[in-house]
């Protein structure tokens, strides 16, 4: 088996047999993910972050705690800790392949993987062509998934 096949097999096993902190509004914050990690979670989803929100943010590491914050306009957009790097899934809200890829590249060094949100029914997401709206446009959905 090649190295790539081994990686895929490991990820399949993690999904089949793992314990997860599933994506939920206002629940996947860093403190909750770290708690879930202490209780044995294999993968933990961060809250959905819109691609345009994370693009252009500044990556800042707190030297005392190790917390990594992506900050934009004085606001934490995404926070993580090196201890969860192999377990945290960045949940991305996007309506286009170019911005999805730019957002993913911006944080890829600090996360284990990406999840494109295709189920959010909120008006904001639907009107922006994100979330559940992607299910009605499979060509656009696949174009985003192809680049990720």
Image (cartoon, rainbow, N blue to C red):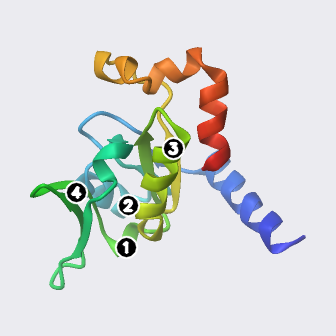
For the residues labelled 3 and 4, the Cα–Cα distance comes to 20 Å
Q: Where residue 83 is drawn, which disc sits there?
A: 1
**Residue at the spot x=51%, y=62% of the render?**
112
Q: Which residue is mark 4?
A: 31
Element assignment for label 4: helix
* Label 1 or label 4, whichever comes before in sequence order: 4
Report the front residue among 55 and 75: 55
Report the front residue among 56 and 94: 56
Q: Is residue 79 left or right of residue 8?
A: left
Element assignment for label 2: helix
Report the front residue among 14 and 40: 14
**Residue at the spot x=80%, y=74% of the render?**
3
The image position of residue 49, as x and y in percent, is: 33, 43
* Label 2 or label 4, whichever comes before in sequence order: 4
**Quarter of the image with the N terminus in it:** bottom right
* Label 2 or label 3, whichever comes before in sequence order: 2
Q: Which residue is mark 2?
A: 37
Q: Where residue 115 is drawn, which disc sits there?
A: 3
The image position of residue 14, as x and y in percent, is: 63, 55
* Label 1 or label 2, whichever comes before in sequence order: 2
Element assignment for label 1: helix
Asked whether the residues under the numbered discs 1 and 2 touch, taking CB atoms below 8 Å apart as contact, a structural biologist would say yes
Asked whether the residues under the numbered discs 2 and 3 touch, taking CB atoms below 8 Å apart as contact, a structural biologist would say no
Asked whether the residues under the numbered discs 1 and 3 touch, taking CB atoms below 8 Å apart as contact, a structural biologist would say no
Residue 97 showing in the rendered view: yes
Task: Identify whether 73 is placed above or below 95.
Answer: below
* Label 3 or label 4, whichever comes before in sequence order: 4
Q: Which of labels 1 and 2 is toward the front?
A: 1
For the residues labelled 1 and 2, the Cα–Cα distance comes to 9 Å
The image position of residue 108, as x and y in percent, is: 47, 64
Q: Which of labels 1 and 3 is toward the front?
A: 3
Element assignment for label 3: strand
């Amino acid at each position: 088996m090649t190295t790539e096949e081994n990686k895929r097999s490991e990820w399949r096993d993690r999904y089949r047999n793992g314990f997860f902190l599933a994506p939920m509004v206002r629940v996947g914050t860093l403190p909750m993910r770290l708690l879930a990690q202490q209780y044995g979670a294999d993968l933990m989803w961060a809250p959905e972050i819109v691609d345009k929100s994370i693009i252009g943010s500044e990556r800042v590491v707190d030297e005392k705690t190790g917390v990594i914050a992506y900050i934009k306009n004085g606001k934490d957009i995404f926070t993580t800790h090196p201890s969860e790097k192999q377990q945290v899934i960045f949940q991305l809200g996007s309506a286009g392949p170019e911005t999805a890829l730019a957002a993913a590249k911006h944080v890829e060094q600090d996360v284990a993987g990406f999840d494109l949100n295709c189920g959010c029914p909120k008006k904001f997401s639907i009107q922006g062509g994100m979330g559940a709206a992607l299910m009605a446009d499979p060509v656009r959905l696949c174009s985003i998934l192809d680049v990720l």
